[in-house]
Amino acid sequence: MIDHDDPAPTVAVVGGGAVGVTAAADLAARGATVTLYDRGDLGAESSGRAAGVLYDAYAEDVDAAIAARSMERFRAFGRSLPGFEFTPCPYVIAVREGDADADAVPAMVDRMRAHGRAVTLVDPETLADRFPIAADDLAVAAVAANAGLCDPGSYVAAVAARARREGVAVVTDAPVSLSRGDDGPAVRTRAPNGSRDASGRRDREFDAVVVAVGAHTAPVLADAGVDVPVIPYRVQALVSSLAYDGPTVYDATAGVYLRPHPTGLLAGDGTEPVAADPDAYDRTADDWFVDSTSATLRDRLADPPVGDGLPVGRAWAGLCTATPDGDPLVGPVADLDGVFVAAGWQGHGLMRAPAIGEHVADGVLASLSGDRGSDDPWIDAFDPGRFDGDETFEIAEGMTVERRDEA
Ligand SMILES: Cc1cc2nc3c(=O)[nH]c(=O)nc-3n(C[C@H](O)[C@H](O)[C@H](O)COP(=O)(O)OP(=O)(O)OC[C@H]3O[C@@H](n4cnc5c(N)ncnc54)[C@H](O)[C@@H]3O)c2cc1C
């Protein structure tokens, strides 16, 4: 617990993706002395490989509130953070004829609207009139107005620059493990050249440690004796020079999304629903993903690619993280005093980073000051302690109508 005579609690944030940089900047803005560690470069893992699709179309109240706050911050960052641009772009959820999920869409939209989200049910004909989208085969569609796009790498870079301005010390190329100091949690890093101890490692104690290591969450916490069911899985994306100037579209039946991109169009998903090794997964896209995405684009675009091929500039794979109930783990780690975790975004970590970073900053500082009680800032549904850690479960991609509609 913090000494109130000591004005600045010390916090280590481990992991410099979208979530870690935001938490670090927000902690420092609230007066903490923050060191941000990354094993490589900032944004080099999932955040740097993301598609940049942002929206608030969530049917569950907590998710909707977080997404709403994130969208508010993305817009504000677009106005105030040098190097970061937020581009408004509606988000369309489309379900094809014959897909049983179509029946669930009206109730899902009602729930989104009940949480104040500007989502509207649109009949396919109207959709095709408004946007360059082929809608003949659609049963139903919904349009979310509070949505947009960004370049994910520029989000990390711009928020990291803000973190530095707030006084955050940023240490890259520094793989960290958790350890225990005399009075609180510590992180163990490789000491810089010339200052290594006999083992080549160095412990540094903090008042709190935030673990925001994405796909490495389970191994980093397991190393400290805590098991969490945060399972990495591969997803894929590609950029094509095919011209497209419409909204972001999620073809829920095909399981493919597409969005406009500065060089044409970006499309993705390609979920591989099996556990992936974060240190040894295949970072190149699979041929089946490129082929199936091309087929979906032919069905969905008003101006589809001509012939069989799709002009693909770049195609890649990255990792998302699944949890047994699809909700993230955000809050204190039981049995590791002073250690907090933020992970398990089920493919939605970038769009939630602005709100989650702020939530983590508020939660850590309230927890450190012992100021919890009835005002416990942590979200119950995200409590890391709700799992035993040894759960087995099926990995399901994060955007499905079924998952969005789960109560
Ligand atoms: C192809 C693709 C498309 C996606 N599209 C979207 C999208 O459009 N919208 C959206 O919201 N989400 C999207 N996602 C998901 C999104 O990328 C993630 O949910 C999000 O980036 C997670 O951020 P993070 O900060 O938790 O993790 P990461 O960005 O993975 O950051 C974790 C960091 O921790 C570091 N680290 C790991 N272990 C250690 C250690 N021991 N010591 C120090 N540092 C360590 C890593 O180097 C890394 O930089 C997509 C993902 C992929 C792969």
Image (cartoon, helix red, strand yellow):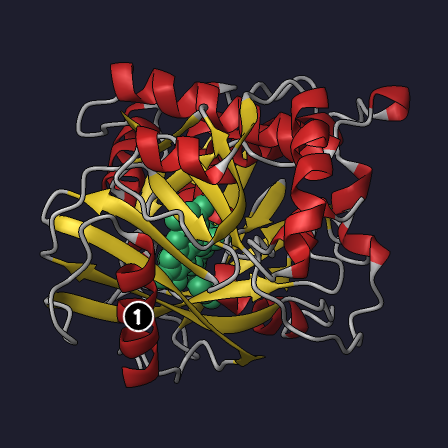
Residue nearer the viewer, 254 or 299: 299
Residue nearer the viewer, 280 or 55: 55
Viewed as shown, does residue 248 lie left or right of 158? Answer: right
Vertical placement of residue 257 versus 217, above or below: above
Q: Position of residue 349 (x, y in %)?
A: 49, 48
Q: Position of residue 272 (x, y in %)?
A: 49, 77
Vertical placement of residue 29 versus 16, above or below: above
Where in the image, quadrant-wise, is ligand 1 located?
bottom left
Q: Quadrant of residue 61?
A: top right
Q: Position of residue 49 (x, y in %)?
A: 31, 59
Q: Do we see residue 183 in this rendering? A: no
Residue at image x 60%, y 30%? 66
Residue at image x 19%, y 38%? 245
Q: Quadrant of residue 52?
A: top left
Vertical placement of residue 18 versus 374, above or below: below
Residue nearer the viewer, 363 or 73: 73
Image label count: 1
Asked which secondary structure carries label 1, the reply is: helix
Quarter of the image that includes the C terminus: top right
Query: Which residue is tagged 1?
Result: 295
Residue at image x 46%, y 19%? 72
Q: Position of residue 283 (x, y in %)?
A: 30, 77
Q: Indicate the amino acid at tag 1.
A: Ala
Q: Residue furthest right?
A: 374
